[in-house]
Amino acid sequence: MHLSNEIFTAPADNINNSGAHLFWADTPDTSLADSIEEFGQSTPVLVYESQNGLNLVAGHARVSALHNLGRPVLARMVEDINETDKGLLYLTDNLQRPMDDGMRLKALEFFAPLMEEKSLKSNILPRLGIKPKSKDAKLLVGWLTMDQTWRDLLKQGNIPLASATPLSRMTSEDRQAAEPLFTGFSWSRSNAVNVLNWLFETAKMNDQSVQEVMHTAGMIKILSQGLSPKDTIARLANAARLARYPELTKLQDRFTAAAGEITGGTRWRMIQPNNFETGGAELTVQIKDAAQLKRAVAEMTDLADAPAWEKLWKLGSGND
């Protein structure tokens, strides 16, 4: 590969602005278009010549913006270039861009067929801001073995990188059954990983498929209720947790109800700190001054007389 020192101009229409190596190509933002319109093109794009004419190596947004403005393109020729070179030059030209895991996966999808996994980890991952021996490196490479639908969900931001671990434990059929849970929703890391683990573990314990677990837990019905994305995710996560830990969930629901009876209308908040291994509870309060402290102390005296304490003493004791 060799980059010519000569910079020349070419009509934007004469440059083929497509190719698999342009893995992050997108519509140029208005700030770039405004800058080029005001000051002109400050950095040439990279092109190579084939039997079909000029082909873009790097500079997709600049070519698109110049095309829209009806202006010629400043270009620099690249000679003796192969597919790996195209990807590396494009990646180098875009290193200043903020990257998310979806963008990193797009880049890896391009390079994976062109090199061995060892080279992919040592040569490409560091350019993507990932240490070759890190947990994220293992997860990203693992995503390359996922079904295309799941890879698309990661690129769209619907599912986090860490979901690769529970997904890899599932069969293809079980992963396919779980896809609707993430289509059209953007899940947090903890919720996504928990739900996938709960579905997998419940299916294994009950000798069922993930599809059967979802149906029994009412998760398919939740998806059809037309709720907001936030409410849908919350209800799906709760349904999966209930399916995995039915008794613990029932205890938690009863605890929450009793705690509400005791602390309602006060500054105090109550949690169960040890998964009901005992019938105890933990009370906390936030105060900002002496007056709030006095009020909290008075409230504590009233809390001690609440009848609902008897319900809490019995939870987890085997007498409830």
Image: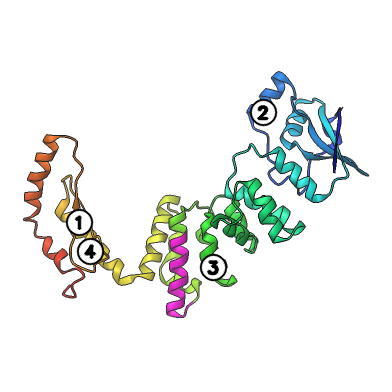
Q: Is residue 55 above or below residue 20?
A: above
| Spatial separation of the CA atoms under disc 3 and disc 1 | 40 Å
Residue identifier under label 4: 254
Q: Earlier in the sequence, mark 3 or mark 2?
A: 2
Give the residue type at disc 4.
Arg
The residue that label 3 is drawn on is 177
266 above or below 258?
A: above
Verify whether residue 197 appears in magenta: yes
Q: Position of residue 205 (x, y in %)?
A: 42, 78
Query: What's the distance in space between the residues labelled 3 and 4, CA to CA?
Result: 32 Å
In the depicted view, which residue is nearer to us: 236 or 123?
123
Q: Position of residue 10 (x, y in %)?
A: 86, 29
Please identify, in this view, whether the residue under mark 3 or under mark 2 is nearer the observer.
Answer: 2
Q: Quick one: SS at disc 3?
A: helix
Q: Position of residue 274 (x, y in %)?
A: 26, 64
The tally of labels here is 4
What is the number of the mark on residue 32?
A: 2
Earlier residue among tags 3 and 1: 3
For disc 1, the marked residue is: 282
The amino acid on which the numbered mark 3 sits, given as a three-letter code, is: Ala
Judged from this view, the residue extending furthest toward the right is: 51
The x, y position of residue 22, in whole percent, is: 74, 44
